[in-house]
Amino acid sequence: MKGGRLLLGTAVASVYVFLMLPIAIVVIASFNSGKYLKFPPDGFSLRWYANFFRLQPFMDALALSFVPPSRRRSPSPRRSTTCATPGAGARRSAW
């Protein structure tokens, strides 16, 4: 029983590392002082973050990320799914 728990814990840890390592590499590379993102970074710079906060389309997208779905102008995923499901079923029954 103890060996099974150890194997399960190792498998779960491996999956977490597999999923999180690319994110960590991108975050570290984002502090690169070079002209392009690369890993390992040439030096430390916040220029990519300064550009992000300076450009209006990025700020609009960031602001939209904090708006709850009930307050957005576009339909919520629940409403979209509810509206699309009968149509998908109607098309499927024609086969």
Image: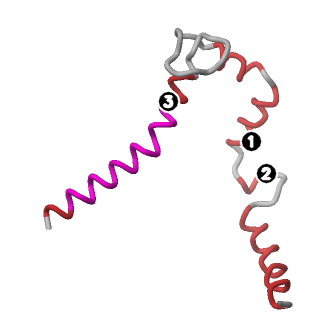
* Residue drawn at point x = 35 percent, y = 48 percent: 14
- Whichever of callouts 1 and 2 sits on the residue coming sooner in the sequence is 1
Element type at mark 2: loop
* Residue drawn at point x = 84 percent, y = 86 percent: 90
The amino acid at mark 1 is Leu
Give percent across and percent down for residue 56.
Answer: 81, 26
Residue tagged 1: 64
Relative vertical location of residue 92 with respect to residue 69 in this rendering, above or below? below
Residue bounds of the magenta highlight: 5-25
Element type at mark 1: helix
Point out which mark residue 32 bears. none
Residue tagged 2: 72
Quadrant (top left/top right/bottom left/bottom right) for the C terminus:
bottom right
Question: How far, Cα to Cα, is label 1 from label 2?
Answer: 8 Å
Residue tagged 3: 25
Residues at circles 3 and 1 in contact by the CB criterion of under 8 Å: no
Residues at circles 1 and 2 in contact by the CB criterion of under 8 Å: yes
The amino acid at mark 2 is Arg
- Whichever of callouts 2 and 3 sits on the residue coming sooner in the sequence is 3
The amino acid at mark 3 is Ile
Magenta region includes residue 4: no
